[in-house]
Image (cartoon, rainbow, N blue to C red):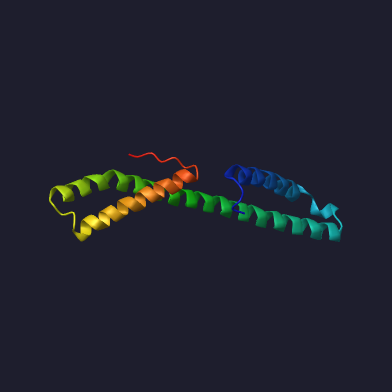
Amino acid sequence: MSDFTKDQLSEAHRALLSTLQKCEKIDENKLLASQRTLLERRISALKVALTLIEKEANNSDSRLSAFEAVYEELANSISTLPAELEKLKADGKEKTVRYKELFGQKLMNNYTVALFERHGISFRQK
C-alpha cells in the first residue's frame, strides 16, 4: 500500500467510512438470511480495510518523521564539521585518526546531500 499518497489514503478512508456507516444503518430484520450474511461480511471487510488504511497512514507519518530526523542530523553535522576540522588543522593534527574520521564524515555528508538532490530533495544548510 505504500505506493499511495497520504491524500489518496485519506480520501479512501473517508469513502469507506461513509459506506460502513450506511451499511450499519441497514435494518437487518428486513433482510433475508443470505442478505444479512452478505451485509455482515461487507461490514467486516470494510472494518479491515479501514484498519489497514489507518495503519498505512501511521506508518507513512512514522517514516516521514524518521526521514526528518536524519535530515536534521545531517544538517547539524554539515554545519559543525568544518569548524572542528579547521580547529584540528590549526593545531597541526591533520594526520590524526580523529581528523581523518571527521574528513571521511564530511565526504559522506557531501555524498548524502548529492543523493538527496538527485532525487529532488533540495537541501538547506543551517
The residue under the point 66% across, 54% down is 49
Give the percent coordinates (x, y) of residue 74: 35, 48
> As drawn, which residue projects farthest toward the front?
95
User: Left or right of 3: which side holds 25?
Assistant: right
> In the rendered view of the protein, which quadrant contains the C terminus?
top left
The residue under the point 72% across, 55% down is 43
The residue under the point 19% across, 46% down is 86
User: Left or right of 70: which side holds 47?
Assistant: right
User: Left or right of 49: which side holds 28?
Assistant: right
**Closer-to-camera residue (66/114):** 114
The residue under the point 22% across, 45% down is 83
Query: In the displayed structure, would residue 13 be above or below residue 40?
Result: above
**Closer-to-camera residue (18/64):** 64
**Closer-to-camera residue (57/117):** 117
Give the percent coordinates (x, y) of residue 58: 53, 51
Query: In the displayed structure, would residue 7 be above or below residue 104?
Result: above
Give the percent coordinates (x, y) of residue 60: 53, 50
Query: In the displayed structure, would residue 1 be above or below residue 122?
Result: below
> In the rendered view of the protein, which quadrant contains the N terminus?
bottom right
Q: How many marks?
A: 0
> As drawn, which residue projects farthest toward the right?
32
In the rendered image, which quarter is residue 117 located in?
A: top left
Give the percent coordinates (x, y) of residue 111: 39, 50
User: Left or right of 119: which side holds 54?
Assistant: right
